[in-house]
Image (spheres, rainbow, N blue to C red):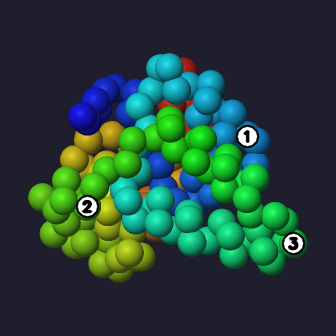
Amino acid sequence: MIRASRRSLVLDANILIRAVLGKRVRNLIYEYADRAHFYTPTICVADASKYLPEILNARGIDTTPVMTVFTLLMQYVQVLEDEWLMEYEVVAKARMRRRDLDDWPVLAAALALRCPVWTQDADFFGVGIATWTTEHIESFFAC
């Protein structure tokens, strides 16, 4: 069940990846999980699942323990199925057409939930939704 609230955020794939590879983003998610709802489209889970092993292998790091961290992290994030986002597909694609069109599900999720996106991707700036970067995300929670 979707539980959007004033403290809801859609997480972009780059945030999921940062949460697994580093401590800061992961700790922020854990710290605010009792006060916020975190969502992500299935494509972001697929992207993180694809790119994490590639990044780890390039760094010579064993993927098994790190992917376990990813699995544990996803207990704090509700995955939004593609069918749930279809109502917003046309609008999201129109707004993303001059940017990265593959990011339309993230924008569609934010539009559907009427909440901001936590991302490091500048492609979301100026598409009609609030965006928060990791550098400033604690200000979002302080409001």
Quarter of the image holding residue 114? Answer: top left
For the residues carrying marks 1 and 3, which lies nearer the camera in this image?
Answer: 3
Please report whichever mark, 1 or 3, sits nearer to the chain's N-terminal start.
1
User: Which residue type does callout 3 highlight?
Assistant: Gly
Residue 43 spot, x, y in % from top left: 40, 65
Could you tell me which residue is drawn at 25 percent across and 72 percent down?
93
Disc count in the image? 3
Residue type highlighted by circle 1: Arg
The Cα atoms of the two marked residues, 2 and 1, are separated by 29 Å
> Is 6 or 68 nearer to us in this picture?
68
Sort mark 3 into few (<14), some (14-19) or many (20+) by Cα contacts within 10 Å. Answer: few
Q: Pointer 2: residues within 10 angstroms few (<14), some, or many (20+)?
A: some
Graded by Cα atoms within 10 Å as few (under 14), some (14 to 19) or many (20 or more), the crowding at tag 1 reads few
Specify the quadrant of the image occupied by residue 102.
Answer: bottom left
The numbered mark at residue 60 is 3
Q: Residue at x 32, y 58 (%)?
A: 107
Element at label 3: loop
State whether residue 63 appears in this view: yes
Report whether 140 appears left or right of 31: left
Q: Alpha-carbon distance for marks 2 and 3? A: 34 Å
Q: Is residue 77 above or below residue 12?
A: above
Q: Amino acid at mark 2?
A: Asp
Q: Earlier in the sequence, mark 2 or mark 1?
A: 1
Q: Secondary structure at mark 2?
A: helix
Query: x, y percentage for residue 129?
Result: 34, 50
Percent coordinates x, y for residue 46 in the rendering = 47, 66
Image quadrant of residue 96? bottom left
Q: Is residue 140 left or right of residue 51?
A: left
The residue singled out by tag 1 in the image is: 24
Name the residue that disc number 2 marks. Answer: 82
